[in-house]
Each structure stands twice: as structure tokens, then as C-alpha cells.
Amino acid sequence: MSLQQEVMEQLKVAMKAKDKVAMESLRAIKSALLLARTETGSGAEMTEEDEVKLVQKLVKQRKDSAAIFKEQGRDDLAGPELAQVAVIEQFLPAQLSEEDIEKVVVQTIDATGASGMQDMGKVMGMVSKKLAGQADGKTISTIVKRKLS
């Protein structure tokens, strides 16, 4: 089942349950999918990889917004953002633990012979491709920095 079909099914369930947070989140995914399809002009189906990137982008936007709201002491606005993150993350592949990400980073560093921070871009690129959709870039970046410094 494609992401769009899955979102529509979940949206129907959320509407019947009158779950406002889920409805907002699912409508955001639906909207982003439609925008992405019309941007290309072809109206063709998106690849699974593109769908994962799109959902990751939505999660990142909400996490960033929640962080800004918390910085400003607006927990009343941060809560709904984090609730939407929980709903949207259902459409991502299972996320790896930090230990698993660290193993991949160490393997990549060994394979490339990276020795310092000047090799961070090369390592980040390779690890990000290997773990596409299974880990966010911020976590990967933190681990790579720790290992290369």
C-alpha cells in the first residue's frame, strides 16, 4: 500500500474517532504529498525513498518548532507539535538505536580510513545513504563528530 493510501486510511479512522491531533498530522502528510507530486508536474507516483524523505522533513520541522517553543517557555505550543511528531513517525521505518548507528559509523570510518574532522563530510554522506530513513541526520552527525574528534 502506498503512503498516500495508508495516510487516507488512517485519516478516515482519525475522523471517526474525532482525534484532532491525528487529523492535523495526517492532513499535513497528505498536503505535503500532493505538493511534492505537483511540483514535478508529472503527477507520477513518488518513490518510497522520496516518501520517507518527505515524512522525515515533516518530523524535523515539528521537532524544530517544538524546540523553539520550549526555548521561549511556550510549552502550551510545544506539546501539540510533539504530539504530531508521534503520529507522523508512524509512517517512518523503524528507527535504529544510537548503538546501532554507532556501529555503522565505526564500520564506515574503518572502511574509508577517515582520520579526522576533515573527513566528516565523506563519512556523513556514506552513513546517511546506508541509514536512509532509519536515523535522523542530527543523531548521525553527533556520533560522527564524537568518533572523528
Image (tube, rainbow, N blue to C red):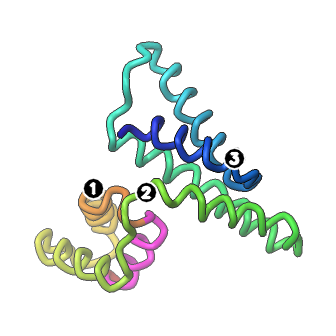
Q: Is residue 62 left or right of residue 102?
A: right
Q: Amino acid at mark 3?
A: Lys
* SS majority, magenta: helix
Could you tell me which quadrant the N terminus lies in? top left
Where 53 sits versus 37, above or below? below
Q: Earlier in the sequence, mark 1 or mark 3?
A: 3
What crowding class fits label 2: few (fewer than 14 Cα within 10 Å), some (14-19), or many (20 or more)?
some
What residue is at 20 percent from the left and 75 percent from the top?
109
**Between marks 1 and 2 in the image, the one whose residue lies nearer the viewer:** 2
Q: Which residue is mark 3?
A: 16
Mark pair 2, 3: CA separation? 24 Å
What residue is at 78 percent from the left and 67 percent from the top?
78
Q: Which residues are magenta?
A: 136-147
Tag 2's secondary structure?
Answer: loop
**Between marks 1 and 3 in the image, the one whose residue lies nearer the viewer:** 3
Where 72 sits versus 7, above or below? below
Q: Which residue is mark 2?
A: 92
Q: Which residue is mark 1?
A: 129
